[in-house]
Image: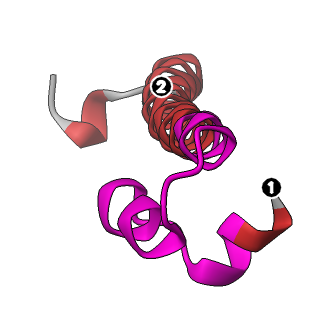
Amino acid sequence: MLLTEWNLDDALKYAKEEGEEKGLAEGKATGLAEGEASARRANAQRMKADGMDAALIAKYTRLTPEEIAEL
């Protein structure tokens, strides 16, 4: 269907579908990033509780020394 043949309902349906797809993709990316950050903090907490050096914790978790100190 050519763009000039679209009616308002078709255009709205298309825009809604595109918006939903974009929103789902953004939500998934955000959720994955938050999950990874949470896992890194949990791992760092366990490492810190076991007495591991903060520099090693930072190396393996990619957390900053400040973030590790706050755990």
Q: Amino acid at mark 2?
A: Asn
Image coordinates of residue 45 in percent, x first then y, are 67, 42
Left or right: 53 as drawn, with respect to 2: right
As displayed, is residue 37 above or below residue 63? above
Where is residue 29, by image quadrant? top left
Q: Quadrant of the N terminus?
A: top left
Indicate the secondary structure of the residue bearing disc 2.
loop
- The stretch drawn in magenta includes residue 2: no
Indicate the secondary structure of the residue bearing disc 1.
loop
Name the dominant secondary structure of the magenta segment. helix
Of circles 2 and 1, which is in front? Answer: 1
Q: Amino acid at mark 1?
A: Leu
Q: Which mark is residue 7?
A: 2
Which contiguous range is marked in magenta? 41-68
Q: Are marks 2 and 1 in contact (CB under 8 Å)?
A: no
Image coordinates of residue 11 in percent, x first then y, are 48, 30
- Determine the residue positioned at 56% across, 42% down: 30
Image coordinates of residue 57 in percent, x first then y, are 45, 60
- Determine the residue positioned at 71% across, 81% down: 66
- The stretch drawn in magenta includes residue 62: yes
Q: Which mark is residue 71?
A: 1
